[in-house]
Amino acid sequence: MKELSIYIHTPFCKSKCNYCSFYSIPLSKLKPAGNSADFEQYAGLLIKETEIMSEKYSLEGSHINSIYLGGGTPSIMPVNFFDNLMDYIRKSFKIAEDAEITAEINPESGDLEKLYALKSLGVNRLSIGAQSFDDGALKTAGRIHNKNDIYNAANNAKKAGFKNISLDLIIGLPGQTEDIFYNDARAILDIEPAHISAYMLSIEKGTKFYKIYDEKNGAGFTPEENIAEYYEILCGLLAEKSYIRYEISNFSKAGYESRHNINYWNRGEYLGIGPSASSFLKFEDGKEIRKTNASDLDKYADNISKKTGDNKNGRGFIEILTEKDKINEEIFLTLRTASGINAKRLSELAGQEVIDKFIKEGLMQNFKENIILTLKGALLSSEIFARIMI
């Protein structure tokens, strides 16, 4: 029986954040804004795409270990949107009794009634997009919540019975001084979430930050060396509180690692539903494919109606992975994790001389029978991957 994770993309959000490169549609661009008919139609598209994919790739009845509702902002959707969707998934697949089912929520939409409803639908993990506890930094980032909204959302999550709560933090938002960083770290530790995702700010093309950064030649943005320093400090603070850094940007209490993300890093199969979502599937003949949907709701809807999406003209595409692709993915995905990659295997793929050089530079180290990145190596991971991949 095939084992899968399922990712469901909800592209709607109240407003677009200045750093966000994910495909999303502000509600103001829907006419009328936030029309429930749009949401009902969208749920129908997701169900239809799941039917198409299940039939095309023989996925029906697959064993599901994790489901992730991401976005956009899933928490702005009406409860019946999730109800109908989850009901269909349960009928079409075999969801494990202990499956991890995550929903992303933004603090301003984390009201208690909504969280109770999500819990009743089987959601057992929440990912709260805090990003910072400094109201000035949040405003600069284009977030529409404040620090009190974060505390309220976290408290409501606990009241609703959620024990597996994750908070997102961005390191290096413009204007983030050392004092602001320490306040962010202390605030997130005060909440005591089971999981923390701490991302170093990356200026992505197409975002508002990218345009500002380009126009001002980086003026006003946190220097990379400061971001690296803050990351190292955070790693130390979290370790003192028994958080395990199990991947470059992810920390958790023991037993609360994100199973959904671990499946990605282990190159496990997953089904991605919705515009811009990607699927990764393996077949008995050794073929592996990555299918990516169009990052456009209208084109996505048109593809679903035509049962297509495999062409490369902006309407989504399918990539058949070469052996080189598979090896490179194995290297950079496993090296992101704290467990790393088998030393003998990496030596076969990249050469022992290269590994020894990284170890001498303090970027890698031996861990049991594996090779892992050091903290310094984690900060320079992109450079390492560029040098090591075949």
Image: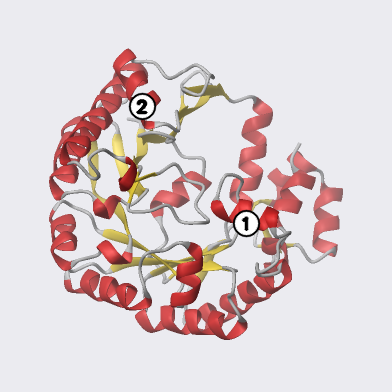
Q: Nearer the viewer, residue 252 or 142?
A: 142
Residue at the spot 17% in from the left edge and 74% down from the top edge: 159
Choose mark 1 or mark 2, whichever is in front. Answer: 1
Q: What mark, if any, has residue 212 been given in the picture?
A: 1
Looking at the picture, how far across and down is residue 299, in whole percent? 39, 24
Quadrant assignment, res 371: bottom right
Q: Quadrant of residue 215?
A: bottom right
Amino acid at pointer 2: Asp
Residue 106 horizontal/vertical position (percent): 33, 61
Secondary structure, mark 1, is: helix
The residue type indicated by label 1 comes to Ile
- Position of the N terminus, as image quadrant, is top left
Q: Which mark is residue 298?
A: 2
Find residue 54 and name its label: none
Vertical side of 304 occupied by 250: above or below: below
Q: Can see residue 158? A: yes
Q: Which residue extends farthest top?
A: 306
Q: Find numbered disc 2 in the image and state the secondary structure of the residue it sits on.
A: helix
